[in-house]
Amino acid sequence: MEPIIEIRSLSKNYGDFSALNSVSLCVEKGTIFGMLGPNGAGKSTLIKVLSCQSRPSAGHAYISGLDVVSDKKEVLSIIGVVPQENSFYDELTVNENLLYFGSLYGVPVIEIKKRSHKVLDMLHLAEKSESKAGTLSGGMKTRLNIACALIHKPDVLILDEPSVGLDPVSRKALWDTIRAVNREGTTILITTHYMEEADLLCDRLLIMNRGKIVVEGKPDELKNAAGEAVIQITSIPGNYQLVKSKVESLEAVSSCGITEKGLKITFKGELPHHAIFEIFKTAGEVINNVGSSRPSLEDVFIHAAGEEWR
């Protein structure tokens, strides 16, 4: 797929401190890309460079082929940035805020009004269009922040920890909003501390630590690489010795043992469930319970950053 963000050997130094250390990355157009990492890992610094708020010390970053340093004005016209703090004005109505931010990007008033209707419908804020921004709930304020960043139809939307401070219901509504924006064709770059958010939302993600990218890939790929998964199967009449050797011969299976709870199978990657179930069936075993556990993104964190991060 076509890359929309390209980062090449990017570094950012503050005196002797290296906030970014030769970071390279490609983000594909139309994806939701997540950035994880402990505080001070370099996520916010990378966001500042990509949003033209900070010049890199070395290397280059491009958005839609435009250099974030030499083509700053053009880059700003094709990105939308949603910071952690509210960027709108509390005393202005929702519509007035959109009119103001649209005008900053040079969008004609008639286009702002057309775009406002579509954006507010998509973000479920249409009923609040004439309400003052300061009266909105926390979740609605986050959505208004996003609306202000979308009013000029950016190619890339950058979200810096948008879920901070939201209750679970508002967070779920925000995820639906992010998916809706992405379906419109907008590439989304999001930083987050919520593992569940990254796992459910992101097509790909990276984990940063000490200014470097430690690991990058699809969530499932990273979880599979973090360690082995386990599946526990119980069946009737429970003659597990009949199926053990056949299950052990499957390529993905690392080990297979008989426990008090049945057959415990440890594996890496994708488990051939159908083949295992067929082995049980052929042996005359009727499966009555299947339990499984696999590495989570938190495990990926520990696996990727290791003892240094802990």
Image (cartoon, grey):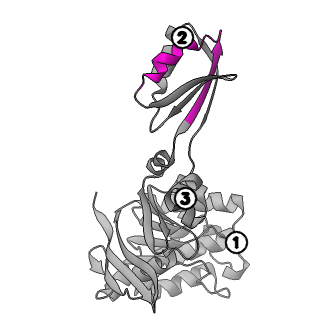
Q: Earlier in the sequence, mark 3 or mark 1?
A: 1
Residue 7 vs 28, above or below: the answer is below
Q: Secondary structure at mark 1?
A: helix
Callout 1 crowding tier (Cα within 10 Å): few <14, some 14–19, many ≥20: some
Which of label 2 and label 1 is nearer to you? 2
Residue drawn at 47 percent across, 45 percent down: 224
For disc 1, the marked residue is: 138
For disc 2, the marked residue is: 242
Which residue range is magenta in the image? 230-250
174 or 133: nearer the eye?
A: 174
* Type of amino acid at the residue the image marks with label 3: Phe
Relative image position of residue 309 (x, y in whole percent): 57, 66
* Type of amino acid at the residue the image marks with label 2: Leu
Q: Earlier in the sequence, mark 2 or mark 3?
A: 2
Residue drawn at 55 percent across, 58 percent down: 301
Which quadrant is home to the N terminus?
Answer: bottom left
* Type of amino acid at the residue the image marks with label 1: Gly
145 or 13: nearer the eye?
A: 13
Which disc, if any, is residue 301? 3
Quarter occupied by residue 8: bottom left
Which of label 2 and label 3 is nearer to you? 2
Q: Secondary structure at mark 3?
A: helix
